[in-house]
Amino acid sequence: MKKRKSLSRILALDLHPGRFGYVVLEDSTELLDWGVRRNYRGIKPWRTVLIQKRLTSLLNQWEPSLVLMNEATRFSPQIGRIVTVIRKEARHRRLMVKLIGRAAVSGTFGEGRPIRKYEIASLLAECFPLLRWELPPKRKIWESEHYRMSIFDAAALAVACLKQRSTTRDTKPRYDAGRGPLSPAL
Amino acid sequence: MARRELKNYLRAYRKRSGLAQGDVSYLVKARTKGEWSRYERALRQPSLRTAFACEEALGIPVTRLFAGLRKSVGDETIDRMQRLESRLKTTGNTMNPARRLARKLQWLGQRLADRLIPHISPA
């Protein structure tokens, strides 16, 4: 049986062109840091460099063992460049990188039924009370998405990944029953 | 795999409190919020006075706030104690009488046993 690495710290990123939302989890349940790093200044290639700088500072500070990113079916060229930069940096630091698809996230929270982004964010705000005051007001149909929703998207990635790990662990013979990595009240 | 502690958890506990860097730098009497930022990123180590101020402001013990630093300093000290013990055992200390040397060795042995062997409760 392949031995699984335990995840001491997870950095989950929700990538957008010019900004990314992030969440850092320790021991699968403890929220260490969260926020949005933005940069819309300068010409586009230069923006990627600045985003890389912000990402490097995060990696230096939190020393994660796993980096999670959202998997999009069609990345914009700018996100593509950021993903390449992240992969390079992760290879340099010998970090695991995992892409989580939208289906996995909605499967984790929706349990079969379609679920809206705001509903997921509300569930996460209940799970992690520290994020409650970061929850933006519900978006009106004519409004663009609030930038703080990126934090919740990143948190959703982390929870989906941990749920995946716990379910795959459940299907295998367990030697440490009852000590699963995460049991958020979803 | 054992969890590798971070040098400090100042940022994590500050964010939990909802305070901004400027607020905490005022509370702990740091010169600027830039100075506080350098503490958070472990680029600078705060003075003992500032460390105690952090404990008071954030309500978390210093040993938890600076968990990684505490561990590395502790490990280094234990390593030095072991080296001192072996040095005293092998060469002895010509300046000190035998009783004093015995006391030193007894103290070092006790400390190392306390630190290295996990405590077993009497129950």
Image (tube, coloured by chain):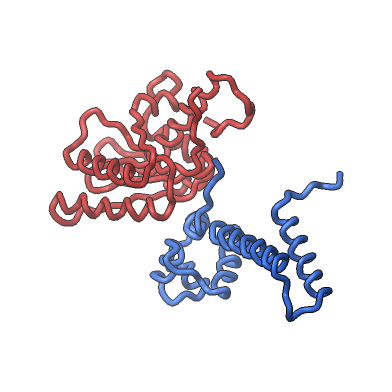
Chain colours: A red, B blue
In the rendered structure, the answer to whether residue A111 lies left or right of residue A86 reads right
Identify which residue, A166 or A136, lies in the foreground.
A166
Based on the displayed image, in which of its 4 quarters is residue B108 positioned?
bottom right
Identify which residue, B71 or A131, lies in the foreground.
B71
Identify which residue, B3 or A148, lies in the foreground.
B3
Q: Which residue is found at the position 18% from the left and 56% from the top? A: A41
Residue A171: where, in percent of width, then height? 53, 18
Number of dots carrying numbers? 0
Residue B84: where, in percent of width, then height? 66, 67
Q: Which residue is found at the position 70% from the left and 53% from the top? A: B116
- Residue B93 seen by the camera: yes
Residue that protrudes farthest toward the left in the picture: A43
Identify which residue, A163 or B106, lies in the foreground.
B106
Residue B80: where, in percent of width, then height? 62, 65
Above/below status of A45 relative to A179:
below
In the rendered structure, the answer to whether residue A27 lies left or right of residue A142 reads right
Residue that protrudes farthest toward the bottom in the picture: B95
- Residue A137 seen by the camera: no
Residue B55: where, in percent of width, then height? 59, 65
Residue that protrudes farthest toward the right in the picture: B123
Q: Which residue is found at the position 73% from the left and 65% from the top? A: B89
Q: Which residue is found at the position 43% from the left and 31% from the top? A: A161
Above/below status of A65 relative to B23:
above
